[in-house]
Amino acid sequence: MTTTRRNLFKLAGGATVGVLFTPAPWRLLTDTALLSETWPGVPVPRHGEVTFQFGNCSLCPAGCAVRARSVANQPVSLAGVPAHPLSHGALCAFGIAGHHLPYHPDRLKSGPVAAADAAVRTALGQLRDTERCAVLDLRPGRTASWTYRRAMAAIHNGIYLAPLEPVPVNLAAAKTVLSLGAPLFDNWGTPGNVIAARDHFRLIQVEPVESRTAAMADLWLPIRPDSEEALVLGLANLLLADKKVAGLPAGFTDRVREFPPTVAASRSGIGEQQIAALAHELQNNGPALVLGANGSPYAAALNLILGAPGHTLVSRREAPVPDEWKKAAPVSDLASVRDGSIGVLLIDESVTGDAPPWSAIQPKLANKAVVVTFAWSKDGYGRQATYTLPTAVYPETVDDIPPAVDSPAAAFRLSAAWIAPPDGVANPADFVGALAGIAVKDALQERAAAIRKSGRGSLFVPSSATSTPARDVKPDDFWKMLQAGATWIDDVDANAAPPKLDLAFPAEAPNQVLPLVVAVTEPDAPALVSPLLSKLYQESNLHLPPQSVALHPSDARSCGLETGSHARLETGCGSIAVDVIVDPDVPPGVVEVSGGPGIRKICGASSRARVVRS
Amino acid sequence: MTNPNKPVKAARYGMAIDLDRCSGCGACMVACAVENNVPPAHQGANDRKGLTWVRVYKVDNGGEGDGRRSAFIPVMCQHCGNETPCVHVCPQQAVDVDPSTGVVGEMPERCLGCRYCMAACPYHARYFNWWDPAWPAGMEKALNPDVSPRMRGVVEKCNFCHGRWHAARRQAVADGKSDMEPVAYLPACAEACPAKAITFGDLNDAASPVAVAAKDCNSFRLLEKLDTDPKIHYISKRDWVRRIADAPRPGDGKESRRG
Amino acid sequence: MRISGYIPFAVGALTALAAGWAAFPHAIYQNRRQPVNFSHKVHTTTAGQKCDDCHSFRADGTFAGIPTLDKCAGCHAAPMGTTAAEKDFIDRYVTPNREPQWLAYARQPENVSFSHITHVKSGGMKCETCHGNEGETDSLRPFQQDRISGYSRDIWGRPIAHSAFRTEGGMKMDDCVNCHRSHGLTHSCLDCHK
């Protein structure tokens, strides 16, 4: 046999024919198809035992009850608790994917904790007599808030600062609700509670844009931008026509006389007949409730006229605290602090709340002040703080959630720690407590004990969906059940005096230099949201994307902007980078903004803005 | 074990969605993505290339100024019962209609990615994986083991949370019931809706809330004239909302402001 | 052509046949060893256990599969016998509380939803029908894993012919479908896929 090329081909041919009668080629064909099942680019879910755990969502003050479905102790999905008396099983888009937050790419996992501690202690030792140490707490009323207040009482010249809490609202008692732009259907109060009460009241939404709340309202009054004051004065004019109401400031009653229905109608763009009908309805279809921006004196005045305090606006006792805690520092307002007097500022922004803009904080700081902020990411006060310290995020930490604005009675509930936090995080309450030398490790348990001791209220247990009077629960069980997701709800205080409303009117109308009125049309987002929220704005058009603004074409043209432009949203309180979207459905003169924490900070206190190309 | 050639009782799972209660909050969209391991948007994704098994559209009555009224319509696979378009066109037989549940099931593992079904679907309820799924580091620990993640190049869509259906059947057998009886379970969107706008159940069970709601005088289905016999019934007292159902695709014409 | 002209052809064909039938299985499969030299026989005879003592159903109907460490540590916190394998197991897994990474012979692809409880309880099937007489083996056989797709040889069926030409005795979809059809059950895709 010679090795010729022809023989080689014969060999190859024989091999080819032969191999077809072996399993090899057929098997390799299917294997390459199977490779797509085990493609390395597709992660494989972990398998394991499925368990259900209960807790409460701490992303906002609603504190909705949560049932987590966990696989091998890792939560894989969250749902509400349908029988819960406050949240009625509702969870918002942020809360539904809250279990993703520990893995968020922007989440801080480590920081200069030791360095910050040393710097603060040094600064505290060097504080002059005129200088103070301050804690700025974005969500007052928590047990951690009491820790801060106790610490500030123990530290020389300590002061505790927190935003003004809104007057609690009893939606279930309302028959007519006049909302001056309050976003009832965009994560206002407790979503489940708003929906449960909805069928029992008539909602009139007064807003320049057709927000989701306006679309759901019984009546939407598209008011001319920034003219709510005119409408309120016009209504007051009609309502006060034949009666006197005690408690209204003289300046207000004088102004009311200047706003008969014709003036109110021409200023607000709402017809005279409509205003008269509205006044008639508020008067005769009560109890009525007026909701406005937090702290709005106009809404407060109208509420006073309509007799809301004691009916739809209620007083609410705080959940009991141990007696030893009561010698804590009082709650103070940032505005009342003397300029240049804060030498050490500790900010707890690890919770969502009304964050004052940096432009309001800066003037209060002394020269070379040390600012430490406790945050989930570096995008909040981290831009200006001396030290940014990471904290545990929502499903990693046990923290109590104070009641929401629409809870007529106090509530005490804990978020659960389903996931272990990273090693490098700091606990703000522990940090501040250690500075003051007070023991804070068991603060939550001590508070729970004080609540149980008071004998008040009832305990809702999610696993059995039952409510028991708190005094019928054994003290040891009380704490265990709270840790397993139970909610304590106070009894309503029948003897409480009606709440006092803040009727401080601004001395003069603010200078209206800025051309556009801000309309926040998206719910307040927490500092971090799951990347799945992209379904709502990037993969659909349902929500305005975060960090963006929408402008009417004429306003966009006059600012030299088009869709996709990078711009800055400037208000009286600060500015922030945004992307522009041009939308003919936005009324002229209005800039619609999404509700992330950065935007809220600069738009919260101010309702006017300008958008400039950056 | 019983050996029937068809199940003892066939279910026809369907939904009734009350459009007067939907506020466009989007909780259903996020809950669906959590339950079904739908990945977050790729950088290049927009509303035409995204994966939104259930998508809430905003529609309006065409009015201007204070004459304008808006509503929100959640649209997912309608599980067409008659001449199911996607089943007809698939060259791979990667879609089938389950006779015992009425669910139109998509098999991403069989799909070759031709996207013919996406063209055939009159409700635009099918979505293509343009990219491999990518979750931020560590977040893949939170994936649901009852649903398999898909690779790029295949189509996927709502299947009424079949992972939950499997779990409900396992529970039924564990409780001693027959595995042939229809099971009661709740898809993620129905469970998540804060307004309780979505009702789910067996349309063949005349006493079930969904069957009763489907017979409501205010209920309608999308694109009735196409005779696809969809299983999603929408309810609204507002006439203009019902008229929208005749439109080829619910939307305000500005589908992608971002281009 | 003369007979000798066919010789290269024949040689090629025979070589290919030999390679495909004898050498190919060794090439395509990779032998992997289980983390622990576990003996089912010791546990079923000496310890008197049955299959479902360790491979049990949970209350929600899911199948526990291969038991996790806490099941083994329940008895083996300290050595119960004198074998080196047990001591090795305790030293390497029980003491440091580390889960052994068992290799499951019957592991199905991720897109398969197989309900053990339906087959065992409603179907009245015995473990041995699909898994063979594992309970009587004294040691775990090596795990033969396909190098390309990663699946176990048991899925195809042990004879190499079954991986390409016939399907029986394995755990592929066709095996499931054949058994279902022979019992007169018709199904749709999503019954078994997820």
Image: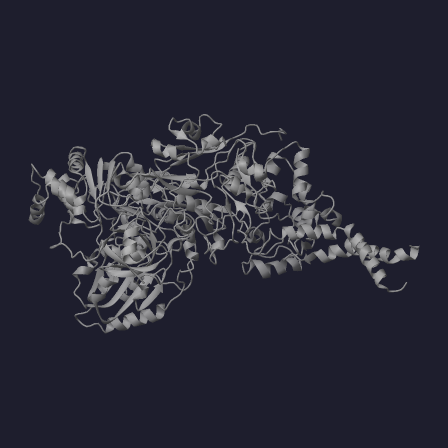
Provide residue A435's location: percent of width, then percent of height: 28, 66
Q: Is residue C25 left or right of residue A258?
A: right
Q: Is residue A329 left or right of residue B106?
A: left
Nearer-the-camera pick, C148 or A316: C148
Provide residue A367's location: percent of width, then percent of height: 22, 72
Residue name at image x 11 percent, y 55 percent: A507
Q: Quadrant of the N terminus of chain C?
A: bottom right
Nearer-the-camera pick, A381 or A83: A381
How many badges with numbers are in the image?
A: 0
Q: Is residue A113 above or below residue A182?
A: below
Here the colouring is one colour
Q: Quadrant of the C terminus of chain C?
A: top right
Nearer-the-camera pick, A361 or A48: A361
Provide residue C125's location: percent of width, then percent of height: 65, 37
Q: Is residue A526 visible?
A: no
Residue name at image x 54 percent, y 45 percent: B115
Q: Is residue A290 left or right of residue A395?
A: left
In the current view of this chain or complex, which residue is farthest to the right? C2
Q: Is residue A293 left or right of residue B176?
A: left
Residue name at image x 63 percent, y 44 percent: C51
Q: Is residue A125 visible?
A: yes
Q: Is residue A116 above or below residue A440?
A: below
Q: Which image quarter: residue A111?
A: bottom left
Provide residue C45's location: percent of width, then percent of height: 68, 47
